[in-house]
Amino acid sequence: MKDTARKHWSKRTRAVHAGSRRSQYGELSEAMFLTQGFVYPTAEDAEARFIKSGEDEYIYARYGNPTVAMFEDRIASLEGAEAGFATASGMAAVNGALTSMLRAGDHVVSSRALFGSCHYVLDEILTRFGVDVTFVDGPDLDAWRAAMRPDTKAVFFESLSNPTLEMIDIRAVAEIAHAVGATVICDNVFATPTFSDAIAQGVDVVVYSTTKHIDGQGRCLGGVILGTEEFIRKTVEPYLKHTGGAMSPFNAWVMLKGLETMDLRVRAQTASAQAIAEALQDAPGVARVIYPGLADHPQHALCQAQMGEGGTVVAVEATDGQAGAFRALNALEIFTISNNLGDAKSIATHPTTTTHQRLTDEQRAEMGITPGLIRLSIGLEDTDDLVADLLDALELA
Ligand SMILES: *Cc1c(COP(=O)(O)O)cnc(C)c1O
Protein backbone atom coordinates (compact mmCIF):
# COMPACT_ATOMS: atom_id res chain seq x y z
CA MET A 1 0.00 0.00 0.00
CA LYS A 2 1.10 3.51 -0.75
CA ASP A 3 0.31 5.13 2.59
CA THR A 4 0.18 8.85 2.03
CA ALA A 5 -1.50 9.29 5.44
CA ARG A 6 0.40 10.50 8.50
CA LYS A 7 0.37 8.08 11.44
CA HIS A 8 -1.58 10.41 13.74
CA TRP A 9 -4.36 11.14 11.25
CA SER A 10 -7.82 10.09 12.32
CA LYS A 11 -10.23 8.16 10.12
CA ARG A 12 -12.00 11.31 8.90
CA THR A 13 -8.76 12.76 7.59
CA ARG A 14 -7.69 9.47 6.04
CA ALA A 15 -11.10 9.15 4.33
CA VAL A 16 -10.40 12.41 2.47
CA HIS A 17 -6.68 12.13 1.76
CA ALA A 18 -5.20 8.64 2.15
CA GLY A 19 -3.98 6.92 -0.99
CA SER A 20 -4.17 10.01 -3.23
CA ARG A 21 -1.84 10.19 -6.21
CA ARG A 22 -1.51 13.13 -8.54
CA SER A 23 -0.66 13.01 -12.20
CA GLN A 24 1.69 15.50 -13.88
CA TYR A 25 -1.29 17.89 -14.17
CA GLY A 26 -1.61 18.37 -10.41
CA GLU A 27 -5.38 17.80 -10.36
CA LEU A 28 -7.14 18.52 -7.02
CA SER A 29 -9.84 15.87 -7.32
CA GLU A 30 -8.63 12.31 -7.92
CA ALA A 31 -8.27 11.52 -11.63
CA MET A 32 -10.37 8.80 -13.19
CA PHE A 33 -8.05 6.62 -15.24
CA LEU A 34 -10.67 5.01 -17.42
CA THR A 35 -8.23 2.75 -19.21
CA GLN A 36 -7.90 -1.02 -19.48
CA GLY A 37 -4.35 -1.03 -20.75
CA PHE A 38 -1.04 0.75 -20.20
CA VAL A 39 1.76 1.43 -22.66
CA TYR A 40 5.45 0.68 -22.30
CA PRO A 41 8.17 2.91 -23.76
CA THR A 42 10.11 -0.07 -25.12
CA ALA A 43 9.77 -3.83 -25.55
CA GLU A 44 12.37 -4.24 -22.80
CA ASP A 45 10.19 -2.17 -20.44
CA ALA A 46 7.17 -4.35 -21.25
CA GLU A 47 9.19 -7.48 -20.53
CA ALA A 48 10.52 -6.05 -17.27
CA ARG A 49 7.07 -5.06 -16.09
CA PHE A 50 5.64 -8.52 -16.76
CA ILE A 51 8.52 -10.05 -14.76
CA LYS A 52 7.95 -7.72 -11.84
CA SER A 53 5.89 -4.53 -11.78
CA GLY A 54 6.97 -1.92 -9.29
CA GLU A 55 4.95 0.56 -7.27
CA ASP A 56 2.47 2.40 -9.53
CA GLU A 57 3.42 0.36 -12.59
CA TYR A 58 0.36 -1.15 -14.23
CA ILE A 59 -0.22 -3.80 -16.88
CA TYR A 60 -3.94 -4.33 -17.33
CA ALA A 61 -6.97 -3.09 -15.38
CA ARG A 62 -7.99 -6.60 -14.39
CA TYR A 63 -4.69 -6.68 -12.42
CA GLY A 64 -4.76 -3.10 -11.19
CA ASN A 65 -5.41 0.51 -12.18
CA PRO A 66 -4.28 3.82 -10.63
CA THR A 67 -7.80 4.97 -9.68
CA VAL A 68 -8.59 1.56 -8.21
CA ALA A 69 -5.26 1.63 -6.32
CA MET A 70 -6.13 5.02 -4.80
CA PHE A 71 -9.40 3.57 -3.54
CA GLU A 72 -7.72 0.40 -2.21
CA ASP A 73 -5.08 2.39 -0.36
CA ARG A 74 -7.58 4.87 1.04
CA ILE A 75 -9.89 2.25 2.54
CA ALA A 76 -6.97 0.10 3.75
CA SER A 77 -5.60 3.14 5.58
CA LEU A 78 -9.03 3.84 7.07
CA GLU A 79 -9.46 0.26 8.27
CA GLY A 80 -5.90 -0.12 9.56
CA ALA A 81 -5.13 -2.90 7.05
CA GLU A 82 -1.79 -3.34 5.31
CA ALA A 83 -3.33 -3.80 1.87
CA GLY A 84 -6.55 -4.14 -0.08
CA PHE A 85 -7.89 -5.55 -3.36
CA ALA A 86 -11.02 -3.92 -4.81
CA THR A 87 -13.61 -6.11 -6.49
CA ALA A 88 -16.54 -5.78 -8.87
CA SER A 89 -19.12 -6.29 -6.12
CA GLY A 90 -19.40 -7.18 -2.46
CA MET A 91 -20.05 -10.79 -3.41
CA ALA A 92 -16.88 -10.90 -5.53
CA ALA A 93 -15.07 -9.84 -2.34
CA VAL A 94 -16.76 -12.46 -0.12
CA ASN A 95 -16.25 -15.21 -2.68
CA GLY A 96 -12.70 -14.05 -3.49
CA ALA A 97 -11.59 -13.93 0.15
CA LEU A 98 -12.89 -17.45 0.81
CA THR A 99 -12.17 -19.22 -2.47
CA SER A 100 -8.66 -17.82 -2.87
CA MET A 101 -7.50 -19.34 0.42
CA LEU A 102 -9.48 -22.61 0.59
CA ARG A 103 -9.00 -25.97 -1.07
CA ALA A 104 -10.78 -29.33 -1.04
CA GLY A 105 -10.64 -30.96 2.37
CA ASP A 106 -10.55 -27.69 4.33
CA HIS A 107 -13.12 -26.88 6.99
CA VAL A 108 -14.87 -23.54 7.53
CA VAL A 109 -16.98 -22.39 10.45
CA SER A 110 -19.51 -19.64 9.77
CA SER A 111 -22.24 -17.88 11.64
CA ARG A 112 -25.68 -18.90 10.38
CA ALA A 113 -27.33 -15.47 10.16
CA LEU A 114 -25.99 -14.24 6.83
CA PHE A 115 -26.99 -12.24 3.78
CA GLY A 116 -28.62 -14.63 1.27
CA SER A 117 -25.76 -14.61 -1.26
CA CYS A 118 -23.10 -15.10 1.45
CA HIS A 119 -25.05 -18.12 2.63
CA TYR A 120 -25.16 -19.42 -0.96
CA VAL A 121 -21.37 -19.14 -1.40
CA LEU A 122 -20.72 -21.04 1.82
CA ASP A 123 -23.54 -23.56 1.66
CA GLU A 124 -23.69 -24.32 -2.08
CA ILE A 125 -20.44 -23.30 -3.79
CA LEU A 126 -17.66 -24.10 -1.32
CA THR A 127 -19.22 -27.44 -0.45
CA ARG A 128 -19.41 -28.33 -4.17
CA PHE A 129 -15.60 -28.08 -4.26
CA GLY A 130 -15.07 -30.31 -1.24
CA VAL A 131 -14.89 -27.71 1.53
CA ASP A 132 -16.74 -28.74 4.67
CA VAL A 133 -18.80 -25.92 6.22
CA THR A 134 -20.28 -25.85 9.72
CA PHE A 135 -22.85 -23.17 10.58
CA VAL A 136 -23.18 -21.98 14.16
CA ASP A 137 -25.38 -19.62 16.10
CA GLY A 138 -23.20 -16.45 15.94
CA PRO A 139 -23.72 -15.04 19.43
CA ASP A 140 -23.13 -18.48 21.05
CA LEU A 141 -19.39 -18.64 21.84
CA ASP A 142 -19.63 -22.25 23.04
CA ALA A 143 -21.00 -23.20 19.62
CA TRP A 144 -17.96 -21.59 17.95
CA ARG A 145 -15.63 -23.44 20.33
CA ALA A 146 -17.37 -26.76 19.73
CA ALA A 147 -17.26 -26.35 15.93
CA MET A 148 -13.48 -25.78 15.67
CA ARG A 149 -11.36 -28.61 14.30
CA PRO A 150 -7.66 -29.00 13.59
CA ASP A 151 -8.48 -28.67 9.85
CA THR A 152 -10.53 -25.47 10.32
CA LYS A 153 -8.86 -23.03 7.93
CA ALA A 154 -11.30 -20.11 7.99
CA VAL A 155 -13.98 -18.55 10.14
CA PHE A 156 -16.57 -16.32 8.49
CA PHE A 157 -19.21 -14.00 9.95
CA GLU A 158 -21.07 -10.76 9.37
CA SER A 159 -20.05 -8.60 12.34
CA LEU A 160 -23.64 -7.32 12.46
CA SER A 161 -25.92 -9.66 10.55
CA ASN A 162 -28.24 -8.87 7.66
CA PRO A 163 -31.15 -8.43 8.42
CA THR A 164 -31.61 -9.58 12.03
CA LEU A 165 -28.81 -7.43 13.50
CA GLU A 166 -27.13 -10.15 15.51
CA MET A 167 -23.70 -9.02 16.69
CA ILE A 168 -20.65 -11.18 16.71
CA ASP A 169 -18.18 -10.71 19.55
CA ILE A 170 -15.20 -10.16 17.28
CA ARG A 171 -12.48 -10.42 19.93
CA ALA A 172 -13.89 -13.61 21.41
CA VAL A 173 -14.50 -15.40 18.09
CA ALA A 174 -11.08 -14.33 16.77
CA GLU A 175 -9.41 -15.79 19.86
CA ILE A 176 -11.30 -19.08 19.45
CA ALA A 177 -10.41 -19.24 15.72
CA HIS A 178 -6.76 -18.32 16.21
CA ALA A 179 -6.35 -21.10 18.77
CA VAL A 180 -6.65 -23.59 15.87
CA GLY A 181 -4.79 -21.34 13.43
CA ALA A 182 -7.87 -20.38 11.37
CA THR A 183 -8.05 -17.14 9.35
CA VAL A 184 -10.85 -14.85 10.53
CA ILE A 185 -12.83 -13.25 7.70
CA CYS A 186 -15.36 -10.60 8.66
CA ASP A 187 -18.07 -9.19 6.36
CA ASN A 188 -18.27 -5.75 7.90
CA VAL A 189 -20.96 -4.07 5.77
CA PHE A 190 -23.37 -3.21 8.56
CA ALA A 191 -20.62 -1.93 10.89
CA THR A 192 -19.29 0.40 8.13
CA PRO A 193 -15.66 1.61 8.23
CA THR A 194 -16.85 4.47 10.47
CA PHE A 195 -17.77 2.16 13.37
CA SER A 196 -15.26 -0.59 12.62
CA ASP A 197 -12.16 -1.43 14.55
CA ALA A 198 -12.26 -5.03 13.34
CA ILE A 199 -8.57 -5.49 12.56
CA ALA A 200 -7.49 -4.12 15.94
CA GLN A 201 -10.12 -6.42 17.48
CA GLY A 202 -8.46 -9.48 15.93
CA VAL A 203 -9.95 -9.98 12.45
CA ASP A 204 -7.44 -11.07 9.79
CA VAL A 205 -9.47 -10.21 6.68
CA VAL A 206 -12.21 -7.59 6.37
CA VAL A 207 -14.58 -7.56 3.38
CA TYR A 208 -16.97 -4.80 2.41
CA SER A 209 -19.68 -4.45 -0.17
CA THR A 210 -18.81 -0.86 -1.12
CA THR A 211 -22.16 -0.76 -2.93
CA LYS A 212 -23.68 0.15 0.42
CA HIS A 213 -22.43 2.99 2.67
CA ILE A 214 -19.21 3.68 0.77
CA ASP A 215 -20.95 4.63 -2.46
CA GLY A 216 -23.85 5.73 -0.27
CA GLN A 217 -25.94 7.05 -3.12
CA GLY A 218 -27.03 3.89 -4.89
CA ARG A 219 -24.94 4.25 -8.06
CA CYS A 220 -22.29 1.56 -8.38
CA LEU A 221 -21.52 -1.98 -7.30
CA GLY A 222 -18.21 -2.66 -5.63
CA GLY A 223 -16.39 -4.58 -2.95
CA VAL A 224 -13.01 -4.76 -1.26
CA ILE A 225 -10.91 -7.34 0.57
CA LEU A 226 -8.55 -5.97 3.24
CA GLY A 227 -5.80 -7.86 5.01
CA THR A 228 -2.07 -8.25 5.42
CA GLU A 229 0.24 -7.41 2.52
CA GLU A 230 1.13 -11.11 2.39
CA PHE A 231 -2.50 -12.33 2.21
CA ILE A 232 -3.58 -9.74 -0.36
CA ARG A 233 -0.53 -10.04 -2.65
CA LYS A 234 0.11 -13.80 -2.41
CA THR A 235 -3.39 -15.28 -1.94
CA VAL A 236 -6.10 -12.83 -3.04
CA GLU A 237 -4.47 -10.98 -5.92
CA PRO A 238 -3.37 -14.00 -8.02
CA TYR A 239 -6.86 -15.51 -7.68
CA LEU A 240 -8.79 -12.36 -8.50
CA LYS A 241 -6.58 -11.02 -11.24
CA HIS A 242 -6.88 -14.28 -13.17
CA THR A 243 -10.56 -14.98 -12.47
CA GLY A 244 -11.71 -11.47 -13.36
CA GLY A 245 -13.32 -9.98 -10.28
CA ALA A 246 -11.62 -6.56 -10.44
CA MET A 247 -13.41 -3.30 -9.72
CA SER A 248 -13.99 -0.96 -12.65
CA PRO A 249 -11.96 2.29 -12.51
CA PHE A 250 -15.16 4.30 -12.91
CA ASN A 251 -16.71 2.58 -9.89
CA ALA A 252 -13.47 3.04 -7.93
CA TRP A 253 -13.63 6.76 -8.61
CA VAL A 254 -17.22 6.91 -7.32
CA MET A 255 -16.16 4.96 -4.21
CA LEU A 256 -13.16 7.27 -3.60
CA LYS A 257 -15.43 10.30 -3.67
CA GLY A 258 -17.96 8.37 -1.55
CA LEU A 259 -15.36 7.77 1.16
CA GLU A 260 -14.81 11.52 1.47
CA THR A 261 -18.36 12.03 2.77
CA MET A 262 -19.01 8.60 4.29
CA ASP A 263 -18.29 9.52 7.89
CA LEU A 264 -20.71 12.47 7.84
CA ARG A 265 -23.41 10.44 6.10
CA VAL A 266 -23.09 7.34 8.28
CA ARG A 267 -23.12 9.35 11.52
CA ALA A 268 -26.21 11.31 10.45
CA GLN A 269 -27.98 8.14 9.27
CA THR A 270 -27.09 6.40 12.54
CA ALA A 271 -28.41 9.27 14.68
CA SER A 272 -31.68 9.04 12.72
CA ALA A 273 -31.75 5.23 13.05
CA GLN A 274 -31.40 5.50 16.83
CA ALA A 275 -34.24 8.06 17.03
CA ILE A 276 -36.43 5.95 14.73
CA ALA A 277 -35.81 2.75 16.71
CA GLU A 278 -36.80 4.57 19.90
CA ALA A 279 -39.91 6.11 18.31
CA LEU A 280 -41.14 2.77 16.96
CA GLN A 281 -40.73 0.82 20.20
CA ASP A 282 -44.30 1.12 21.45
CA ALA A 283 -45.94 2.19 18.19
CA PRO A 284 -49.20 0.61 16.96
CA GLY A 285 -48.65 -2.16 14.42
CA VAL A 286 -45.13 -2.90 15.72
CA ALA A 287 -44.56 -6.24 17.42
CA ARG A 288 -40.83 -5.79 17.95
CA VAL A 289 -37.98 -3.42 17.11
CA ILE A 290 -34.48 -4.85 16.65
CA TYR A 291 -31.68 -2.30 16.88
CA PRO A 292 -28.36 -2.83 18.69
CA GLY A 293 -28.41 0.79 19.87
CA LEU A 294 -31.51 0.05 22.00
CA ALA A 295 -30.92 -1.00 25.60
CA ASP A 296 -33.23 -4.03 25.11
CA HIS A 297 -31.09 -5.53 22.30
CA PRO A 298 -29.52 -8.72 23.74
CA GLN A 299 -26.06 -7.51 22.69
CA HIS A 300 -26.44 -3.81 23.44
CA ALA A 301 -23.38 -3.78 25.73
CA LEU A 302 -21.28 -5.56 23.10
CA CYS A 303 -22.46 -3.06 20.51
CA GLN A 304 -21.37 -0.16 22.71
CA ALA A 305 -17.96 -1.72 23.23
CA GLN A 306 -17.38 -2.94 19.67
CA MET A 307 -18.97 -0.27 17.46
CA GLY A 308 -19.96 2.55 19.81
CA GLU A 309 -23.21 3.10 17.86
CA GLY A 310 -25.97 0.91 16.47
CA GLY A 311 -25.48 1.63 12.76
CA THR A 312 -27.84 2.69 9.99
CA VAL A 313 -30.23 -0.28 9.81
CA VAL A 314 -33.28 -0.94 11.99
CA ALA A 315 -35.41 -4.09 11.78
CA VAL A 316 -39.08 -3.98 12.78
CA GLU A 317 -41.55 -6.79 13.01
CA ALA A 318 -45.05 -5.84 11.97
CA THR A 319 -48.03 -7.30 13.79
CA ASP A 320 -50.06 -9.67 11.59
CA GLY A 321 -47.05 -11.24 9.85
CA GLN A 322 -46.46 -10.89 6.12
CA ALA A 323 -49.90 -9.36 5.44
CA GLY A 324 -49.24 -6.65 8.01
CA ALA A 325 -45.72 -6.06 6.70
CA PHE A 326 -47.02 -5.71 3.13
CA ARG A 327 -49.76 -3.26 4.19
CA ALA A 328 -47.14 -1.13 5.95
CA LEU A 329 -44.64 -1.32 3.05
CA ASN A 330 -47.28 -0.30 0.51
CA ALA A 331 -48.33 2.68 2.64
CA LEU A 332 -44.84 4.18 2.97
CA GLU A 333 -44.37 7.49 1.16
CA ILE A 334 -40.74 8.48 1.79
CA PHE A 335 -39.21 5.03 2.25
CA THR A 336 -38.92 3.23 -1.07
CA ILE A 337 -39.33 -0.52 -1.40
CA SER A 338 -35.95 -1.71 -2.58
CA ASN A 339 -33.10 -3.92 -1.43
CA ASN A 340 -30.07 -1.64 -1.29
CA LEU A 341 -28.94 -0.27 2.05
CA GLY A 342 -26.64 2.45 3.33
CA ASP A 343 -28.15 4.76 0.69
CA ALA A 344 -29.00 8.46 1.09
CA LYS A 345 -32.58 7.40 0.34
CA SER A 346 -34.40 5.50 3.06
CA ILE A 347 -35.27 1.98 1.95
CA ALA A 348 -37.62 -0.69 3.27
CA THR A 349 -37.08 -4.37 2.46
CA HIS A 350 -39.12 -7.48 3.20
CA PRO A 351 -36.34 -10.09 3.58
CA THR A 352 -38.63 -13.16 3.60
CA THR A 353 -39.90 -12.51 0.07
CA THR A 354 -36.80 -10.82 -1.44
CA THR A 355 -33.19 -10.97 -0.16
CA HIS A 356 -33.73 -14.20 1.81
CA GLN A 357 -36.40 -15.76 -0.43
CA ARG A 358 -34.11 -18.60 -1.55
CA LEU A 359 -33.89 -20.06 1.96
CA THR A 360 -36.35 -22.60 3.33
CA ASP A 361 -38.90 -21.59 5.98
CA GLU A 362 -36.83 -23.56 8.46
CA GLN A 363 -33.57 -21.79 7.57
CA ARG A 364 -35.26 -18.40 7.83
CA ALA A 365 -36.73 -19.32 11.20
CA GLU A 366 -33.26 -20.36 12.43
CA MET A 367 -31.93 -16.94 11.37
CA GLY A 368 -34.81 -15.14 13.07
CA ILE A 369 -36.29 -13.88 9.80
CA THR A 370 -40.01 -13.90 10.47
CA PRO A 371 -42.71 -13.15 7.84
CA GLY A 372 -43.53 -9.86 9.58
CA LEU A 373 -39.91 -8.61 9.55
CA ILE A 374 -39.11 -5.39 7.66
CA ARG A 375 -35.53 -4.15 7.25
CA LEU A 376 -35.24 -0.37 7.28
CA SER A 377 -32.13 1.28 5.90
CA ILE A 378 -32.19 4.82 7.22
CA GLY A 379 -31.16 7.52 4.76
CA LEU A 380 -30.40 11.22 4.94
CA GLU A 381 -33.93 12.64 4.92
CA ASP A 382 -35.25 14.62 7.90
CA THR A 383 -35.60 12.33 10.94
CA ASP A 384 -39.04 13.62 11.95
CA ASP A 385 -40.36 13.09 8.41
CA LEU A 386 -39.08 9.51 8.48
CA VAL A 387 -40.62 8.81 11.89
CA ALA A 388 -43.99 10.19 10.74
CA ASP A 389 -43.85 8.12 7.53
CA LEU A 390 -43.16 4.93 9.51
CA LEU A 391 -45.74 5.58 12.23
CA ASP A 392 -48.46 6.25 9.62
CA ALA A 393 -47.59 3.15 7.60
CA LEU A 394 -47.07 0.75 10.50
CA GLU A 395 -50.39 1.69 12.04
CA LEU A 396 -51.96 -0.14 9.11
CA ALA A 397 -50.04 -3.32 9.94
C1 LIG B 1 -25.03 -6.38 0.09
C2 LIG B 1 -24.21 -7.28 0.91
C3 LIG B 1 -23.28 -8.13 0.31
C4 LIG B 1 -23.10 -8.23 -1.19
O1 LIG B 1 -22.69 -7.06 -1.77
P1 LIG B 1 -22.93 -6.71 -3.34
O2 LIG B 1 -22.16 -5.45 -3.53
O3 LIG B 1 -24.40 -6.58 -3.50
O4 LIG B 1 -22.40 -7.85 -4.12
C5 LIG B 1 -22.53 -8.96 1.13
N1 LIG B 1 -22.68 -8.93 2.46
C6 LIG B 1 -23.57 -8.13 3.08
C7 LIG B 1 -23.69 -8.16 4.56
C8 LIG B 1 -24.38 -7.27 2.33
O5 LIG B 1 -25.26 -6.49 2.93
Image: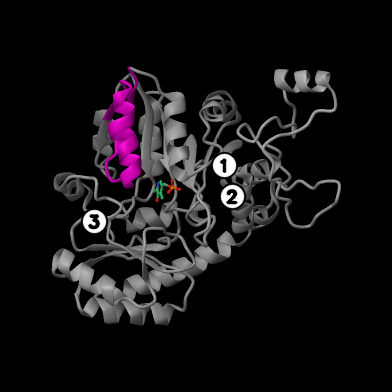
x 52%, y 42%: residue:
88
Of mark 2 and mark 3, the one earlier in the sequence is 2
Q: Which residue is mark 2?
A: 251
In three-dimensional space, the C-alpha distance between marks 2 and 1, rounded to whole angstroms, equals 7 Å
**Gap between marks 2 and 3 measured at Cα:** 29 Å
Question: How far apart, in angstroms, are the residues tagged by discs 1 and 3?
Answer: 30 Å
Please tell me whether residue 211 belongs to the stretch shown in magenta: no
Q: At 39% across and 69% down in the image, what residue appears? A: 274
Q: Quadrant of the N terminus?
A: top right
Q: Earlier in the sequence, mark 1 or mark 3?
A: 1
Horizontal relation, residue 108 to residue 220: left or right: left
Tell me where the magenta segment starts and ends, as one range.
105-133
Image mark for residue 161: none
Seen at 45% across and 70% down, the residue is 271
Q: How many marks?
A: 3
In the picture provided, is 14 more to the left or to the right than 326?
right
Residue under numbered circle 3: 353
| Amino acid type for the residue under numbered disc 2 | Asn
Q: Which residue is mark 1?
A: 247
